[in-house]
Amino acid sequence: MAPIVSEEYKRKKKIELIEAARKVFIEQGFVRTSMQDIMDEAEVSRGTLYSYFNNIDHTFIEVLKYEDQKNIDYFIPSSEITLWEKLKNWVEKWQFYIEKIDQTLVHANTEFFLSSDYVKSKDDSSYLSKRYVRTTEAIEKLIEEGTRTKEFKPQQSSRSIAMFILSFLNGLMLDTYQLGDEQTIVKDQLTVLLYSLEKLINPTIINKE
C-alpha cells in the first residue's frame, strides 16, 4: 500500500521543484532546458517530477505563476508602510532585477513566449494575457485603495496609471536585455518613472513633508 502523502507535503514539494526549475531556466534559458535537467537539479525521479508537471511548457508556466504571485502579494496593503512607500519600494526593486538581468528569468521568458506552442494563442485565455491582467489589476487596486483613503489624488485613471507602470518597466527590461544596463542607465530611468508617478498619483504624504 502506497504511503499517504499530505496536501502540505505536496505543496512544499511542488515549491521545491519550482525553485529547482527556476534555477535551471535562469542558467540555461527555456529552449535548452529539458525535464531531465530539472530532475537532475532537484534530485528527483522522473515519476516524481511528472506527478507535478506535464511537460516543460507546463513547468515553465508554473514557475511564472510562482514568481507572479509573489509580485501580486506585494501589493496587499500593510499597516507598516504607506501605499506610496509600498509602490515606490516595488519600483526600486526593479533596479536590481533589471540590472542583474542575467540572474533572472528574462532570457527564458523571451524564448518561451517566442517559441512555445502553449502561448501561440493570442486570445484572452493565454497566460501572457492573464499575467498582464492580474498584475495590472493588483497595481490598480493599490492605487484605488490609496484614493479611497485619500492618500492618493490621482490625475489619471488608476487603470491607465497601472498600465503605464507596466509598459514602462517591461520596455526598460527588454531594452536592457538587448542593449545592456550601461546603455539604458536603469537607475536614472527609474528615478524619472518615480518622479512621473509622484505627479500622476499626487501622494498626500509627500505634500505634507
Image: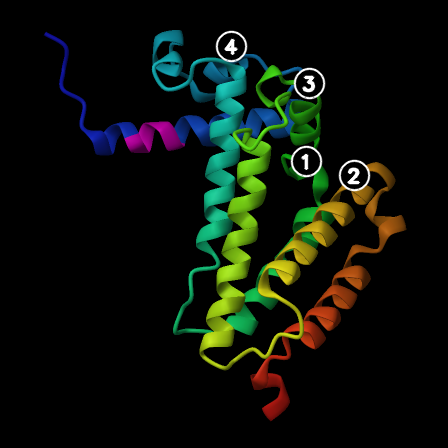
First in sequence: mark 1 or mark 2?
A: 1
Which amino acid type corresponds to the residue marked 2 in the rendered image?
Tyr
| Residue under the point 47% across and 29% down | 62
Circle 1 crowding by C-alpha within 10 Å: few under 14, some 14–19, many from 20: some
**Tag 1: amino acid:** Val
Q: Disc 2 on helix, strand or loop? A: helix
In the foreground, 145 or 176: 145
Q: Which residue is mark 4?
A: 36
56 vs 205: above or below: above
43 relative to 134, above or below: above
Q: Secondary structure at mark 4?
A: helix
Query: For the stretch drawn in magenta, what is the main secondary structure?
Result: helix
- N-terminal of the pair, mark 3 or mark 2, is 3
Q: Are marks 1 and 2 in contact (CB under 8 Å)?
A: yes
Disc 4 + disc 1, Cβ < 8 Å: no
Q: Is residue 14 magenta?
A: yes
Residue type of the residue flagged with mark 4: Gln
Please provide the residue range marked out in magenta.
11-15
Q: Which residue is mark 3?
A: 115
Specify which label sits upstream in the sequence, 2 or 4.
4
Q: Nearer the viewer, mark 4 or mark 3?
A: 3
- Res. 106 mark: 1
